[in-house]
Image (tube, rainbow, N blue to C red):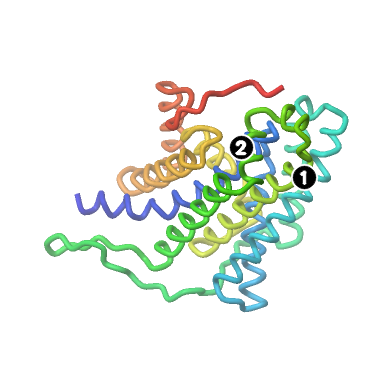
Amino acid sequence: MVDFLQQVINGLAQGGIYSLIAIGWTTVFGIVGIINWTHGEIYMLGAYAGWLITTYAHLPIIPSLLLSMVLGAFIAMAVDEIGYRPLRKKGVLAATGFITALGLSQTIRYSASAGFSPNPKAYPVLVNQELITLVSIGDKKITISSVHLIVLFSAVVIMSLLELFMKKTLTGKAMLAASQDMQTLRLMGVNAESLIKITFAISGALGAAAGFFIGMLYYINPMMGALAGLKGWSCAILGGIGSIAGSLVGGIILGIVENLTAGYISTGYKDAIGFMVMILVLLIRPSGLMGYRFEEKV
């Protein structure tokens, strides 16, 4: 039981990172109506932005994280301006958005590989790494590393602030309304393009934050966005597209399942088991755990 609980604790930080990626996915899909396959690459560039800032500017963790999020927001807005906005203006986004996203994704990925080199890179030590005892059961202890604890706490804070933004600010409420009916919102005088830009900025900031956190835990490389992007989308579907709380739950579940699989079966199966859990949930509850009802985007 102690070993089981330890694996669950270890999966929480990873789950928090997945949740940030998932929320970035779901905000763009819910408002713009496209599956932004470049989100994994924005996550990767956010990780490299953090690496550059912490390695060469030697800034502390909080300024480095915030600056990485700002850069991620600008990168996401640039992706929208270059790739998606021209298609929206011509009214062909739904038909060609996937092809455009796939092309942009590949371009960003291999450009990063050429610019940063394919070799993995590590962040400098940003916090003292020590084990914190949570519970003692007999002669065994359930612990969490200080880095994992900081990552989990920071992810929860970011998601809580986003939830407050969506529920308490006029822009956030407009974004929620846009996810229901963008056309009606346009008729009410809301600048839809500005709202879409804000949506991409938020998505990019969340992706960059996830990349920064993963850089604190593991090595980073230019190809890291491909699988992470798929997992983020899986978490969004698992929790329920359009729900921030659902993305949080989906990410936590996937992070815990992966750690349990790696601990009790094999690290080689953890990715497959995670996707199997997602498929199983969708077979039982197609709308996801938080019960979002999919509607066709026109």
Circle 1 Cα neighbour tier, 10 Å, few/some/many (<14 / 14–19 / ≥20): few
Position of residue 285 relative to residue 150, above or below, is above
Q: Secondary structure at mark 1?
A: helix
**Residue 42 on image: x %, y %:** 67, 51
What quarter of the picture does the C terminus occupy?
Answer: top right
> For residue 106, which quarter of the picture?
top right
> For residue 185, which quarter of the picture?
top right
Residue at point 77%, 45% (across, down): 194
**Residue 2 on image: x %, y %:** 21, 53
**Residue 277 on image: x %, y %:** 41, 32
Position of residue 191 relative to residue 161, above or below, is above
259 vs 156, nearest the viewer:
156
- Left or right, residue 199 beside residue 145: right
**Number of numbered discs visible in the structure rendering:** 2
**Residue 294 on image: x %, y %:** 56, 23
Residue 284, numbered label: none
Q: Secondary structure at mark 2?
A: helix
Q: Which residue is mark 1?
A: 194
Position of residue 228 relative to residue 180, above or below, is below
Q: Disc 1 to disc 2, how far (Cα)?
A: 14 Å
265 vs 111, nearest the viewer:
111
Identified by mark 2, the residue type is: Leu
Residue at point 46%, 35% (across, down): 239
Residue at point 50%, 32% (across, down): 240
170 vs 237, nearest the viewer:
170
Identified by mark 1, the residue type is: Ser
Position of residue 120 relative to residue 204, above or below, is below
Residue 176, numbered label: 2
Circle 2 Cα neighbour tier, 10 Å, few/some/many (<14 / 14–19 / ≥20): some
